[in-house]
Amino acid sequence: MTPLITRLVVAVGLALSLVACGGGAGAASQVSPIATTEVDLPKSYKFVPAAIVVEAGSTVTWTNRDDFTHNVTLPDGTAPLTMRPGEVATHTFDTAGTFDYLCSLHPKDMRGRIVVTGG
């Protein structure tokens, strides 16, 4: 291959790999929220569903089904809700708003969003 073709192949491969890795920081903001108060952490380094909608006063429960410790770090200054494998964590959302959260142990991959309505 000529140097120009080699550089072109490398550039296309890099661009495709960046697109494939698009599940990071903005993933939760790009999906429609699902009405539920339950969020799973399956063996995949993500929150499922990534975005949920709840009524003000609802308690959200996260269940860690992974083999690794994770946490939920909320933007309101609440201490991280840490879950070892098999554990659950809960938090009650009393006021309306949009709350983006993450696992501070795996912030690149694990991000979520809670839309709280009413209140």
Image (spheres, grey):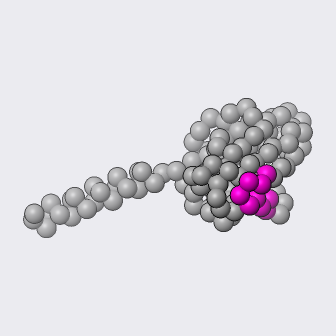
Q: Disc count in the image? A: 0
Q: Nearer the viewer, residue 2 or 46?
A: 46
Please report the residue visible at 90 percent of the width from the left and 39 percent of the height from the top: 57
Residue 32 is drawn in which quadrant? Answer: top right
Residue 77 is drawn in which quadrant? Answer: bottom right
Magenta part of the protein: which range? 80-88
Was residue 29 drawn as part of the magenta stretch in this picture? no
| Quarter containing the N terminus | bottom left
Q: Is residue 8 depicted above or below 28 in this figure? A: below
| Quarter containing the C terminus | top right
Was residue 87 drawn as part of the magenta stretch in this picture? yes
Picture coordinates of residue 13, whole percent (x, y): 29, 57
Q: Is residue 85 left or right of residue 43?
A: right
- The answer to whether residue 92 is seen in the rendering is yes
- The answer to whether residue 71 is seen in the rendering is no
Picture coordinates of residue 100, whole percent (x, y): 70, 51
Residue 79 is drawn in which quadrant? Answer: bottom right
Please report the residue visible at 57 percent of the width from the left and 61 percent of the height from the top: 108
Q: Is residue 79 left or right of residue 39?
A: right
Q: Nearer the viewer, residue 12 or 104?
A: 104
Residue lying farthest to the left in this orientation: 2
Please report the residue visible at 84 percent of the width from the left and 49 percent of the height from the top: 91
Picture coordinates of residue 89, whole percent (x, y): 81, 52
Q: Is residue 3 left or right of residue 44?
A: left
Q: Is residue 2 depicted above or below 93 in this figure? A: below
Q: Is residue 51 depicted above or below 4 in this figure? A: above
Please report the residue visible at 77 percent of the width from the left and 61 percent of the height from the top: 82
